[in-house]
Amino acid sequence: MSFNIPILLLTFNRLDTTVRVFEKIKQLKPKYLFIASDGPRSDKPGEAQKVEAVKNYIFSQIDWDCEIKTLFRKKNLGCGRAVSEAITWFFESVDKGIILEDDCLPHPDFFTFCKEALDYYDNDARVLSVSGTNLQGGVQRGDGSYYFSNYGGIWGWATWARVWKNYDFEMKNLDSFLETGSLRKIFSDRKQQRFWTEILKRAKHIDTWDYQWHQMTWTYGGIHIVPNFNLIENIGFSNDGTHTANKPYWYDRLTNLNAKVQLKNIVHPEYIGINTKADDFLFEKCYKPISLYTRVCLFLKKRITKLL
């Protein structure tokens, strides 16, 4: 039987990463495939040809029976609007689906994991998304195949139209959200409260869409599903990446990419509730600003590596 959960693939100008990601989709042969691409930037010579090459490759590889819908921008909208508007376009046609960017390489179990979770929590308003990325460094959380988090990872993920309808790119309710102390209801840790307060204040001036997503989910007090095994490899750390030019120093250690994935038989947790230990670990290891000492050590390590 064909895979019947709709998939949205977000592409742009990187043929090398798109080839690897699309090969996984091709192996799955989904019944419903949506493809969206931002337009080329006018100040980037040759980018129009790169964007076109990605489109041509994808169409040359679709050799199975499926329904295809496309959203190809002629002009560049930027990362923030291009991605968020493409997701809005996606959920105008489907009630639930999987979202993959062209640099998020999925393990085959990612798709079945998302399908199981989307179906299982279809009518549970508490659950807002399903992430494919685990950054716990191999530590198992809880008694199931996944745990619940305040953080909705977007390196390979899935959600419902019922959730995305509340997304607000402009963050119109941000002031009231912060003034009423909503972050204190989400995070008991003051460091996380202060950190996200400052991040959200700056979000309107950054060409991105994911901070808006975080703020929306915290506004509604929802929770996110995170697998106990990492199912996504980010292969986009290069100069071509919009926000991922350099691989984070923690990435290889925390993704545990060499672990054997064991999600064939998904075990649902007995209770629904945030795993604060997992969230605190994620903040300390990934989000929390690193000290000057650590930055110096990383800089020296990078320079020494280049000399060897």
Image (tube, rainbow, N blue to C red):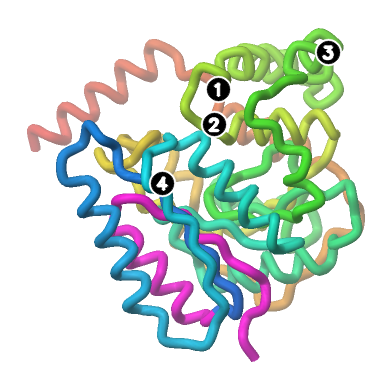
- The residue drawn where x is 30% and y is 61% is 54
**Marked residue nearer the N-terminal end (3 or 4):** 4
- Indicate left or right for 214 with 258 as reference: right
Pick whichever, 195 or 121, lies toward us. 121
**Marked residue nearer the N-terminal end (4 or 2):** 4
What's the amino acid at mark 1? Lys
- The residue drawn where x is 52% and y is 87% is 65
Q: Secondary structure at mark 2?
A: helix
Q: Which residue is identified by label 3?
A: 181
Q: Which residue is identified by label 1?
A: 288
Magenta region = 1-29
What's the amino acid at mark 2? Lys
Callout 1: 10 Å neighbours few (<14), some, many (20+)? some
Q: Which residue is identified by label 2?
A: 285
Q: Position of residue 108 (x, y in %)?
A: 53, 73
Mark 3 or mark 2, which is nearer to you? 3
Q: Secondary structure at mark 1?
A: loop
- The residue drawn where x is 70% and y is 56% is 92
Mark 4 or mark 2, which is nearer to you? 4
Residues under numbered marks 1 and 3 in contact, where contact means CB atoms less than 8 Å apart: no
Query: Between marks 3 and 2, how big is the CA–CA gap?
Result: 25 Å
- Indicate left or right for 51 with 147 as reference: left
Callout 4: 10 Å neighbours few (<14), some, many (20+)? many
Q: Position of residue 176 (x, y in %)?
A: 81, 13
- The residue drawn where x is 41% and y is 69% is 22
What's the amino acid at mark 4? Asp
**Marked residue nearer the N-terminal end (4 or 1):** 4
Query: Between marks 2 and 1, how big is the CA–CA gap?
Result: 7 Å
Q: Position of residue 84 (x, y in %)?
A: 58, 41
Residues under numbered marks 2 and 1 in contact, where contact means CB atoms less than 8 Å apart: yes
What's the amino acid at mark 3? Gly
Give the numbered dot on residue 38: 4
